[in-house]
Amino acid sequence: MNEVAALLAAFLEATGRQAAIWERREGSVVPTLLGASSSVFAERTTSCAQAWDVASWARSHHLHAQLVNTGDSVGWLFVEAGEAVQEPVAVGGPAADVDRLLGRLLPLVRRITRERDGATRELAERYEEINLLYAIGELLGGTTSVESVADTLLAELAATLGATRAVFLQTNRAQGTLAPIASLGLADDAYEPVSLEQATHIAVRAYHAGSACTEDGNAASLADPILAARAAPLMAVAITRPSSGVGITGTFPVPTRRGAEGIAVPLGVLVLAGRPGGAPFSGGDRKLAVAIGTQVGVAMHNASLVRAAVERQQLAREMRLAHELQLKLLPSPQVVQPEARAAARVVPAESVGGDFYLLARLDQDRTGVLIGDVSGHGYQSALVMALALSAAAIHVQAAFDPSIAIEAVQRSLREELMSTEMSISMCYAVIDSRANELRFANAGHPHAFKLSSDGHATRLGAVAPPIGFSDAPIEECVMSWRADDRLVFLTDGVIDARDPAGRRIGEAEVLQWLTHTSPTDTPDTILDAIYGRLNAHTGRAPLRDDCTVVVVDRMVPSAVNPGESSI
């Protein structure tokens, strides 16, 4: 690990002693090098690490060996003996300095390896969830009728959540019921339609809430007597889509629920039960089910849009609605409040595009800001954008730092990008107001800046090519951060925008605009100014690429409510 090697190199510089750490992970016979102060010393200790009696081997080669725990493994720390240890020394002499530095070194090594092992476990736990998201994405992307793949979709979700009984209920607004279109672990005629007036039924509760509901014990038997046999734990999740404000899929009223990110329109409900051992559904299960419900809801609505376009020959109108629906997938800038202020806008070159952003309120001290740009534009880019946004939303919450998050997205999208021959430039930054630093990882995104109060723009330089070009590791970078700094992220559609004569704006002119901003300007003010100048430049000329701008700043810590919880 680079961090351990750097620590041991510093130890060598401070003490003049070479050091190396070898570890043997559980189930492994051959030890591996965790880090060494030099390649020469690593080679010297290779045989020692593999010896049957490590301590005796070390003494015979004038080395000190200390057994250490390194996260989920055990290992040996080898240090050169040196003359200061061979001969008696005074208290507080060189040997005491070595011991003191070793006492500081080992806790740092343990922390680094615990973070590594924790990230590995977290990714392993998320592996099935990511696979499910992509399996369902491929399933829904290959059909214009969700009903035709309902059985497969239900089986995939139930298998991931460990359910043996499940039902897929679709809204029938004409009859005021939730009607089953697919079931698992039940006879075909065992599950009757559920009236939307049956308020105690868990499916109806989830439908009206527009989210997920769970029940255990006797309450579960009352909430759904068919699925919750023998008081098995239950979970119901609404299948929702964001409202476009225009109803074209029917003449019947659509019940809606206003939430933090807009209006959710329920299209159906998924109900699951029968986990082995009667284990209840966890908070993580609920989050995954809600994500799937939203994904299915968007697919169901998109399918209905396609059918409506064919039937009514109003393709232009449906394209506008698709644009609105895609924008609804993006988070509201208000999600980072109250600690931060944000403004963001995506303007596709066509009805739908490949630009996206993500804002995350990680905790009271940290705000996450991500921007991505899928190569090309149009429907294919929009589909890859939706997959990338879903994967990023999961990984930014699970990862320990920006580089781990982007590498996880890179692994998740590898096959999709290879098959489509597409790529994604992506930059993810975390503002840490407590540490007064900005940590970021940039995979080929050229236009990401930290803007100081004096108008100076510092580029968050790319450290790796865009996702889809290679699987190379993505390094994390750190900058200082002050309360009056702000982030300004743009996609190349803004920089390359052309006027009617074909002249592009260029990055230099955009940066010149930013130098005239004031620390008192809000993100919304800056966003409006950029798009105002962009529109003035392009005039009637059509956009050649999607244009996205994200502006974020952190409020003064004293202005933040200390009792506010993170989301």
Image (cartoon, rainbow, N blue to C red):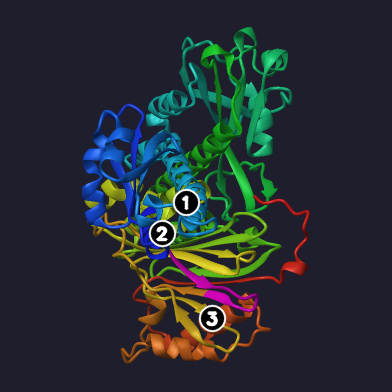
Residues rendered magenta in the picture:
475-487
Q: Please name the amino acid that badge 3 sits on.
A: Leu
| Residue 527, percent from left and from top | 56, 78
Where 187 sits versus 196, above or below? above
The kind of residue tagged 1 is: Leu
Element under label 1? helix
Q: Are marks 2 and 3 in contact (CB under 8 Å)?
A: no
Which residue is labeled 2 in the image? 11
Nearer the observer: mark 1 or 3; the answer is: 1
Residue located at (59% from left, 88% from top): 517
Looking at the picture, does residue 216 appear above or below residue 267? above
| CB-based contact (under 8 Å), mark 2 and mark 1 | yes
Residue under circle 3? 451
Residue under pointer 1: 102
Q: Is residue 140 visible?
A: no
Q: Quadrant of residue 374?
A: bottom left
Q: Earlier in the sequence, mark 2 or mark 3?
A: 2
Who comes first in sequence, dot 1 or dot 3?
Answer: 1
Instruction: Decide if residue 213 is on the left or right side of residue 270.
Output: right
Q: Kindly identify the residue that appears in the image at 78 percent across and 60 percent down.
A: 561
